[in-house]
Image: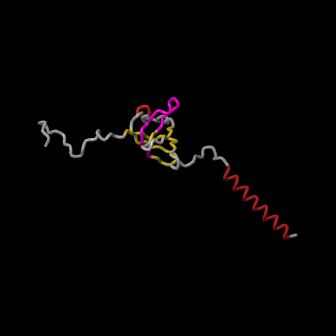
Amino acid sequence: MKKVLGIMLAVAFVVVAVSVMAKEKAAPKEKGEKAAMAELTLTGKIAKGEAAGSFVLVDADGNKIELPKPKAAKGDEKPINLEEFVDQQVTLEAKGDKKVPTVKQIVSVEKVAAAGDAKPADAKAPAAGGEVK
């Protein structure tokens, strides 16, 4: 009798433990609990998406990464207007998923200077008389 009771107790313990583990794995995240987002730095060309008002970042390999609508600016922050960057090479700082590049939140966007835009390091400005020394 004690043996049967011990076996039943052990089986009940295992069933409860497995049930708890299954609930933890399948349970949706609590409201307000967010999945950890990675810091992303992406470079590419901003293009208009298929849907009205949507944008994508096209990387060097031609992969398209959908971009979310930028959050509204807070306080004295300048709002991010992706329309300004269409058809331009940019570096985009964002938060999202690194495994499958997915942007969840845009942090900043900067235009990448074209090769001809930068002054060479050796270039000198003309002196007061117009001569280059």
Taking the image as shown, residue 2 lies to the left or right of residue 27, namely: right
Compared to residue 106, the image places residue 6 above or below, namely below
Residue span colored magenta: 41-56
Q: Residue at x 76, y 62 (%)?
A: 13
Farthest residue in the front direction?
61
The image quadrant where one finds the C terminus is: top left
Residue 98 percent across, percent down from the top left: 50, 49
Compared to residue 30, the image places residue 20 above or below, namely below
Q: Main secondary structure of the magenta part?
A: strand
Residue 107 percent across, percent down from the top left: 46, 41
The image quadrant where one finds the N terminus is: bottom right
- Indicate whether residue 55 is drawn in magenta: yes
Residue 12 percent across, percent down from the top left: 79, 61
Compared to residue 123, the image places residue 82 above or below, namely above
Q: Residue at x 73, y 55 (%)?
A: 19
Q: Residue at x 50, y 42 (%)?
A: 103
